[in-house]
Image (spheres, rainbow, N blue to C red):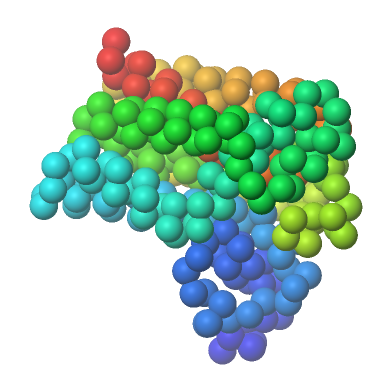
């Protein structure tokens, strides 16, 4: 059956996304062609349904057997284990590169490719984890799981727009994972929108009038635009580390905007 479904290119790309963006053993079930990994980002938000779902399940069921703050930390840890801390690694490299590289494009790229972590990267990770954990802890227990399910795919959908807005900053030979994502087609762009917006629309519907949707969407998009301008001005192109950092920061902006609304 898997061989017959192999004729559908989207199927290969979906498997590539699940293998690339998680550390779950999907590769034991099916191995897509290597060319499919260039289109894996077209299913990135759907992978977010899985990673966000793991977090949401932990936030929902965890408090039944443990204190809620412990469940929040465990949810974050489980997602990092699921993704292999892929995006957190990008966040650290991004801040090391842009913090220590100044305006020198080649130096920024060289620092981001260095496997060692510096002061900027450590501080970025600590602040990101602290803010993420705190915002989730102070959300009502019935809201946090839904927020994670909405924010994870939405952030990945928003970040995927970098592929449409600028070229890749490296060559395939100098790419960290030797994969250069292709520019999404119109059909792929529609698919990304569906994957990222469907959970968000469900969240807004379930929340009723408790949150203002325009503010909730505006804040992450503003962060996305600011980071896009920063990346474009310094590198004239994106990297995988840039995508990981933007994804986490857009998601964090969603949580912060939601927390402010719930607090006020």
Q: Residue at x 73, y 60 (%)?
A: 177
Q: Residue at x 42, y 35 (%)?
A: 129
The x and y percentages for residue 47 are 52, 56
Q: Is residue 62 above or below residue 67?
A: below
Most extreme residue toward the top is 264
| Badge count | 0
Q: Is residue 27 above or below residue 64?
A: below
The quadrant the N terminus occupies is bottom right
In the rendered image, is residue 190 in sight?
A: no
In the rendered image, is residue 141 in sight?
A: yes
Q: Quadrant of residue 262?
A: top left
Q: Is residue 200 left or right of residue 35?
A: left
For the residue pair 3 and 167, the one nearer the viewer reads as: 167
Q: Quadrant of residue 237?
A: top right
Most extreme residue toward the left is 65
The quadrant the C terminus occupies is top left
Q: Residue at x 71, y 48 (%)?
A: 114
Q: Is residue 195 above or below residue 39?
A: above
Q: Residue at x 42, y 21 (%)?
A: 257
The x and y percentages for residue 93 are 65, 41
Q: Is residue 240 left or right of residue 157?
A: right
For the residue pair 199 and 56, the one nearer the viewer reads as: 56
Q: Is residue 7 left or right of residue 175?
A: left
Q: Quadrant of residue 95?
A: top right
For the residue pair 66 and 162, the one nearer the viewer reads as: 66
The x and y percentages for residue 218 are 54, 20
């Amino acid at each position: 059956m898997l061989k017959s479904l192999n004729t559908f290119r989207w199927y290969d790309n979906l498997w590539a996304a699940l293998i690339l963006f998680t550390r779950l053993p999907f590769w034991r079930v099916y191995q897509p062609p290597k060319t499919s990994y260039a289109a894996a980002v077209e299913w990135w938000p759907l992978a977010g349904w899985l990673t966000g779902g793991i977090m949401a399940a932990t936030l929902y069921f965890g408090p039944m057997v443990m204190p809620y703050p412990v469940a929040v930390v465990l949810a974050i840890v489980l997602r990092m284990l699921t993704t292999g801390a892929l995006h957190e690694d990008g966040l650290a490299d991004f801040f090391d590169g842009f913090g220590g590289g100044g305006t020198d494009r080649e130096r920024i790229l060289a620092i981001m490719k260095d496997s060692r972590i510096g002061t900027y990267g450590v501080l970025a990770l600590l602040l990101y984890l602290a803010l993420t954990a705190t915002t989730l802890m102070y959300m009502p227990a019935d809201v946090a799981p839904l927020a994670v399910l909405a924010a994870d795919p939405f952030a990945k959908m928003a970040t995927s727009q970098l592929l449409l807005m600028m070229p890749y900053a490296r060559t395939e030979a100098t790419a960290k994972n030797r994969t250069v994502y292709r520019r999404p087609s119109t059909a792929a762009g529609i698919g990304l929108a569906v994957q990222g917006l469907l959970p968000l629309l469900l969240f807004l519907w379930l929340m009723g009038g408790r949150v203002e949707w325009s503010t909730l969407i505006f804040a992450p998009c503003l962060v996305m635009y600011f980071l896009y301008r920063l990346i474009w001005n310094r590198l004239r192109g994106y990297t995988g580390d840039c995508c990981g950092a933007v994804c986490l920061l857009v998601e964090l902006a969603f949580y912060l905007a939601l927390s402010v609304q719930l607090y006020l």
